[in-house]
Structures are given as structure tokens and as C-alpha cells.
Image (spheres, rainbow, N blue to C red):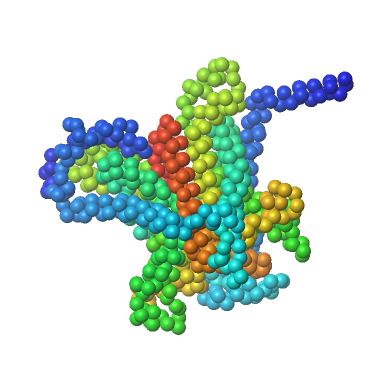
């Protein structure tokens, strides 16, 4: 009987747990759970920074500069599996940074033009029925996984460029320097543009739609044609949103790893537009993020590990800076009660 | 500017652009229809050019999107066989995937990763969204949490992946993967990858839930308080049920980010295509084990990887694209249940 009473008592305790919590306790537990996210982010920054530390310890800020032979340096790191000497850590990362910036900038510039034009199309020009079809398609473009973009790039676009766009003269002009296979800047930028344009379209569309219609109507009433009114009034009002969209898309493009690894040719090389604009476009490249993918198998070599984490730290820093910049740029939009 | 275009002021019903036009029929015909607009043919050349470019850009994006779906569909129908879905990956004698064998394991891997990722991200996102909108005290802490979610949203997934490697290679977390003879912790397992996946799913889930909660009209809360309910009871019985469709949207977006992520799988799930369990305890051995997902299977079988079977990569990519399309449709359906009109952004492109 005594045990039965104990069971009943235990059940009572369980019952009490099922009762609604007092507000204070609920607030504390929810707050604690939320703080876990903050702790996680701080842990992320700290862990990446600590793992990257040896690189900066040995190279200082000259790490960001150029002038080394990246391939030889990285190969030395891969080979040094245990107790690397200080000289193994030597690296000059500028070519990678340059390639990252080049591909990102080209994609963002191309993308913002397409995005602004197509947002005007979706919001202002297209009949409602058309824009109802266009929007899901653009959204689909944004949700296609990057590996599928990479697959199409490597199996369709790269052979196409290699077989049909590169002529023998271009191939011969850089012979001995680099081999043109089709994988390179052109395909990378083309796919990257397609990947980041939907992000910009989304942000610009939201901004366009949130501009009070009366502003444009005023312009139309003054005799401007609808397109002029959009250009003169609406676009000017959402300029901050356009910049913010470009900034956020740039953050996305910087971090793209898998697709670029698949279609960029994977060579430590900087596309050199001095070889002729067209030839330069076909030359291979390697970005910070795609290097991490390329060498993640060998990450147990200490020097290489520190180097890869330093790339990650740089990307993290860049993404952080860009999102702060995006936030600051968007501040003036608050006065139109724009979301996003 | 208007000197050369003395067109009559066009009358046009002011139209706020919404995700779903509330009155689709309103613009068709009628006295406020499009018939009276100034004809583009009377515009200046520059304006006509911009008009043409805008149409071209919009149609260009659609064409790309349609081309991707059609091309992958064509390749998928060409190469996808039921046998591929139900058989495990096999190394042929030459060390490639070109022989028999399909992608059952990657399919299971994708599902396991999704379940782990959502199981971690959902409670966290829910708690933080509720806490920030309903309590949010002290306000500096709420701001810290909110901006850290924004940082997570902006972090490239390759960085999240490599961070996960640093975390799970700690001696402390050795039980979550396996330990090599030398005492080095491998740091790659379904748990490791799934935990990092949750970071991918967290921002869309949080944003969807928070937006939903913010859109709940204040009188709902006041009515609950007037009935003598505490805050937490109001949250549990009134607020969370009323944002169920937002949570569903967020979850769907989170899932589609998880199944599309390649970098995290490549780095944190090891490089075996077959699922290899660690230890003997059923279930746990799978979670501690390594394997692959559809994305890493596609990667390995493309010319960039070592599998060397592009036709299988196409088949797997087709399956993956079908998942993505289905999730997109789901988002659409959940979106319809929401009262608030949704722009592209709210629909989770960003």
C-alpha cells in the first residue's frame, strides 16, 4: 500500500508539471533558450578565429597581400602533416581574395541591372496575371540548390564554352601559362548572377510595392508616361533598397562554394584581362570558399587547417560587414514603413 | 521631360502590388481599364528601350527558370530508374560509381539530416521568436539575440560547415562521432552535420514565426488577458496556434535550405557515399555514423567529384529538384492560409 501511495504522489507531481507554468519561469526559460543562439554565434566567431590564429601569427597582415606562389605554398602545407615549422605557414592570399572579389563584383553588377529591370516589369508593367506566373518562377530560381546549378554548369555550360566559344587563337595565346577548358570566369559569373538575381528581385520588388501609389500618380498627373514616373519617382525613392539588395546579394555570392568549385576550373590563377578581354573571361580562377571545399580532405594537416580557417574567418568578417552595411543603408527606408 | 509626350493623363486604378491580387478581376476591362493608357509607341526612344529591356529581363529570368526545370526533367526521365532509388551506392571495380548501385543511402541521409536539423531548429526558433515578441526583456539582450540570428542568416554555409568541424573535433564532443586510433576525434557524423543544418534552418523559421506573431492583432491578447489568462497560457493557447501556418511556412523553407546544402554535407558527413554506422547501439550508431545526402551524391558523381557517373548525378538532381518544387508548392499553400499578403521576401527568398 505504501508503494501505491508513493506512485500516486509521484503522479501528482507529474500533474503539477503539466500545469501552466508561472509567467516568470516561462519568461526565463524562453529567454535562456534564445540566448543559446547568441552563445552559439559567439562560439562560432571564437572557434573560427582561434583555429585561424596560427596563420595570422606567422604571416601578420601581409597575409592579405600578394606575391607568393599559392600552389607551392598550399602543397607544402598539405605535405606537412605533423609539427609544421613556422615557414610552412607562409601564405600570401591576395590571388584568392582578388578572384573572390572579381567574381562577386561582376555577378552583382550584372545581377542588379537584371534585377531592377525585372522588378519594374513584375511590379509596374506586367499585367497581374503575368506577374502571378513570373513570381513563382523567380522564386524557384532562388531555391534551386547550388549543386544543381553546378551540375548544369559543369556538364552543359563548361563543355559548350570550351567547344564553341574559345577559338584556337585564344587557346594558343595563353599556352604555357594556363589551359583554357571552358571552366572559368565566364561560366562562374554567369551562374553566380543567376543565383543571386532572385534575391535582389525579391528585395527590390518589396520596396517598389511599398512606395505609396499616390507619389507615382502625382508624377503621372503631371504628364509623365508611366515608365518615366517609375524612373523619376519610384526608383529614386527606393535607391537605398537597391543598394541594400546589392550588398546582401554580394554577401551571398562571396560565400558560394560548391557551385564555384565545380565550374571555376579550380586553379590558383587570377583571370588576367590583359590577355585580351575575351581570353581573360575564359581563364580559370579559385575563390576563398571554393578553396575550402577543394582542400577539406587534407584539413588534418595543422598548417593547412589554420589557413582554411583563416579563409573562413575572412568570409565571416566580410559577410558580417556586408550585413551591417545593408542594415545601415536600409535605415532611410523606414520612413516609408517598408518591411525587409 | 514631358514636352514631347502630350498624352492624356492615363487613368489607372491605384494598385498596391500584393502577392495575391485581392480582386484579380478588377483590372480587366471596365472603365478604369488599360485601354486609355498612353501607347508606348508614342514614347521617346529611350523610354521604349527601357520598356523593352524590362520585359526582356523579366522574361529572361522566367526562361532560365523554365529551362532548368525542363532540362533537368528531360535528363531525369532519361536516366532515372526505380532501381536507382531503391539500391545502395556501390563502388565498381574501377573505383567509380559507374556500375550498378543507386542512391538509397543518400536519400535516407537527406531525410535524417532534415529531421535532425528541424528538430533542433524548430524549438529554438519558436522560443526565441516568442520571447522576443512577447517578452523581450531586457531589451539589449533581445537585440543581441536578434542580431545573432541575423549573423547566422548572413553566414555562408561553408563557414558554418567548417565551424562545425572545429566544434565536433573537440575531445568533449567525441561521443558524437568516432575516435581514430591516435585519439583524434573524427568530427564527422550525422549529428554533427544535422546540428549545423539547424543553423541553416533557424533564420527562416525565426523570421516566419516572428512576422506571424507580430501580425496577430492586439485584441486577441487583450481578450485572453481579460479572461484571466497568464502570458504564457495566452502564448500557448492563443498565439502559437494562430501562427501555425507561419510556422509551417518557416519549417518548409528551412527544409528546402537543408536539403539543398552541399558544403555542410561534404565537410561534416565524411566522404563515404554509403551510410557507415559507428558502434552497435541501433539508431545511435546511425547518428554517429557517416554517409551522404542527395547533394553530396550529385557532387561526387559529377565530373568535379570522383564517382564518374554523370547520368546518376542527373537522376539524383532530378529527384532533388522534385523535392524543391514540392516544397515551393507547399510554401505557396501555407502562404494562402496566411492573412497577411506576402511579397517575395516574406515568401523566403532571402
Residue B70 relative to residue B6: left or right: right
Q: Position of residue A27 (x, y in %)?
A: 63, 31
User: Which sits in the foreground, B297 or A74?
Assistant: B297
The quadrant the C terminus of chain A occupies is top left
Q: Position of residue B15 (x, y in %)?
A: 28, 35
The quadrant the N terminus of chain A occupies is top right
Task: Tell me what residue is drawn at x 35 percent, y 72 percent.
Answer: A164
Residue A188 relative to residue B224: left or right: left
Q: Position of residue A123 (x, y in %)?
A: 31, 43
Task: Tell me what residue is drawn at x 33 percent, y 32 percent.
Answer: B22
Task: Tell me what residue is drawn at x 60 percent, y 67 percent.
Answer: B92
User: Which sits in the foreground, B279 or B198?
Assistant: B279
Task: Tell me what residue is drawn at x 20 percent, y 51 percent.
Answer: B47
Outermost residue to the right:
A2
A291 shown above or below A201: below
Q: Is residue B332 visible?
A: yes
Q: Position of residue B115 (x, y in %)?
A: 60, 45
Which corner quadrant of the image does residue B170 belong to?
A: bottom right
B340 shown above or below A161: above
How many circles with numbers are drawn on the protein?
0
Which corner quadrant of the image does residue B234 belong to?
A: top right
Residue A126 relative to residue A249: left or right: left
Q: Is residue A271 visible?
A: no
User: Which sits in the foreground, A114 or A32?
Assistant: A114
A239 shown above or below A99: above
Amino acid at each position: 500500500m505504501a508503494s501505491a501511495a508513493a506512485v500516486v504522489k509521484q503522479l501528482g507531481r507529474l500533474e503539477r508539471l503539466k500545469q501552466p507554468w508561472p509567467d516568470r519561469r516561462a519568461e526565463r526559460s524562453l529567454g535562456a533558450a534564445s540566448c543559446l543562439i547568441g552563445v552559439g554565434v559567439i562560439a562560432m566567431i571564437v572557434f573560427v578565429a582561434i583555429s585561424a590564429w596560427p596563420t595570422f601569427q606567422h604571416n601578420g597582415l601581409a597575409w592579405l597581400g600578394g606575391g607568393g606562389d599559392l600552389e607551392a605554398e598550399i602543397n607544402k602545407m598539405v605535405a606537412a602533416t605533423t609539427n609544421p615549422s613556422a615557414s610552412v605557414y607562409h601564405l600570401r592570399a591576395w590571388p584568392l581574395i582578388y578572384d573572390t572579389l572579381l567574381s562577386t563584383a561582376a555577378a552583382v553588377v550584372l545581377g542588379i541591372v537584371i534585377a531592377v529591370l525585372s522588378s519594374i516589369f513584375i511590379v509596374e508593367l506586367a499585367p497581374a496575371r503575368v506577374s502571378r506566373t513570373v513570381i513563382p518562377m523567380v522564386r524557384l530560381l532562388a531555391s534551386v540548390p547550388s549543386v544543381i546549378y553546378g551540375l548544369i554548369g559543369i556538364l552543359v555550360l563548361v563543355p559548350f564554352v570550351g567547344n564553341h566559344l574559345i577559338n584556337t587563337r585564344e587557346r594558343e595565346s595563353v599556352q604555357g601559362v594556363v589551359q583554357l577548358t571552358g571552366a572559368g570566369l565566364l561560366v562562374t559569373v554567369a551562374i553566380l548572377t543567376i543565383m543571386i538575381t532572385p534575391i535582389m528581385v525579391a528585395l527590390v520588388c518589396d520596396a517598389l510595392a511599398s512606395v505609396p501609389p499616390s507619389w507615382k500618380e502625382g508624377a503621372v498627373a503631371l504628364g509623365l508616361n508611366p515608365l518615366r514616373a517609375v524612373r523619376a519617382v519610384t526608383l529614386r525613392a527606393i535607391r537605398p533598397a537597391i543598394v541594400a539588395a546589392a550588398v546582401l546579394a554580394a554577401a551571398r555570392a562571396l560565400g558560394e562554394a560548391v557551385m564555384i568549385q565545380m565550374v571555376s576550373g579550380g586553379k590558383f590563377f587570377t583571370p588576367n584581362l590583359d590577355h585580351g578581354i575575351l581570353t581573360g573571361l575564359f581563364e580559370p580562377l579559385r575563390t576563398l570558399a571554393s578553396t575550402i571545399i577543394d582542400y577539406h580532405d587534407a584539413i588534418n594537416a595543422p598548417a593547412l587547417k589554420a589557413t582554411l580557417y583563416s579563409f573562413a574567418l575572412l568570409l565571416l568578417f566580410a559577410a558580417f560587414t556586408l550585413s551591417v552595411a545593408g542594415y545601415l543603408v536600409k535605415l532611410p527606408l523606414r520612413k516609408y514603413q517598408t518591411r525587409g | 521631360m514631358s514636352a514631347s509626350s502630350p498624352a492624356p493623363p492615363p487613368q489607372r486604378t491605384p494598385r498596391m502590388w500584393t502577392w495575391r491580387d485581392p480582386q484579380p478581376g478588377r483590372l480587366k476591362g471596365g472603365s478604369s481599364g488599360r485601354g486609355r493608357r498612353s501607347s508606348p509607341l508614342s514614347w521617346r526612344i529611350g523610354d521604349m528601350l527601357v520598356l523593352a529591356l524590362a520585359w526582356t529581363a523579366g522574361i529572361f529570368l522566367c526562361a532560365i527558370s523554365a529551362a532548368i526545370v525542363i532540362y533537368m526533367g528531360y535528363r531525369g526521365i532519361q536516366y532515372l530508374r526505380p532501381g536507382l532509388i531503391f539500391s545502395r551506392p556501390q563502388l565498381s571495380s574501377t573505383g567509380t560509381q559507374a556500375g550498378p548501385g543507386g542512391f538509397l543511402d543518400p536519400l535516407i541521409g537527406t531525410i535524417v539530416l532534415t529531421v535532425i536539423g528541424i528538430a533542433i531548429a524548430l524549438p529554438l526558433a519558436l522560443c526565441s521568436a516568442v520571447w522576443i515578441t512577447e517578452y523581450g526583456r531586457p531589451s539589449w539582450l533581445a537585440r543581441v539575440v536578434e542580431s545573432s540570428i541575423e549573423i547566422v542568416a548572413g553566414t555562408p554555409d561553408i563557414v558554418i560547415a567548417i565551424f562545425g568541424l572545429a566544434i565536433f573535433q573537440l575531445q568533449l564532443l567525441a561521443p558524437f562521432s568516432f575516435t581514430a586510433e591516435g585519439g583524434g576525434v573524427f568530427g564527422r557524423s550525422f549529428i554533427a552535420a544535422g546540428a549545423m543544418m539547424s543553423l541553416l534552418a533557424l533564420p527562416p523559421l525565426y523570421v516566419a514565426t516572428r512576422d506571424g506573431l507580430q501580425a496577430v492583432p492586439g485584441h486577441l491578447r487583450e481578450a485572453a488577458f481579460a479572461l484571466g489568462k497568464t502570458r504564457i497560457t495566452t502564448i500557448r493557447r492563443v498565439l502559437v496556434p494562430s501562427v501555425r501556418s507561419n510556422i509551417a511556412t518557416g519549417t518548409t523553407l528551412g527544409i528546402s535550405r537543408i536539403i539543398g546544402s552541399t558544403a555542410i554535407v561534404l565537410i561534416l558527413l565524411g566522404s563515404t557515399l554509403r551510410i557507415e554506422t559507428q558502434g552497435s547501439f541501433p539508431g545511435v550508431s546511425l547518428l554517429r555514423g557517416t554517409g551522404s545526402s542527395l547533394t553530396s551524391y550529385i557532387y561526387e558523381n559529377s565530373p568535379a567529384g570522383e564517382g564518374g557517373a554523370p547520368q546518376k548525378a542527373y537522376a539524383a538532381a532530378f529527384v532533388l529538384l522534385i523535392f524543391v518544387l514540392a516544397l515551393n508548392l507547399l510554401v505557396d499553400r501555407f502562404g494562402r492560409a496566411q492573412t497577411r499578403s506576402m511579397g517575395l521576401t516574406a515568401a523566403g527568398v532571402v
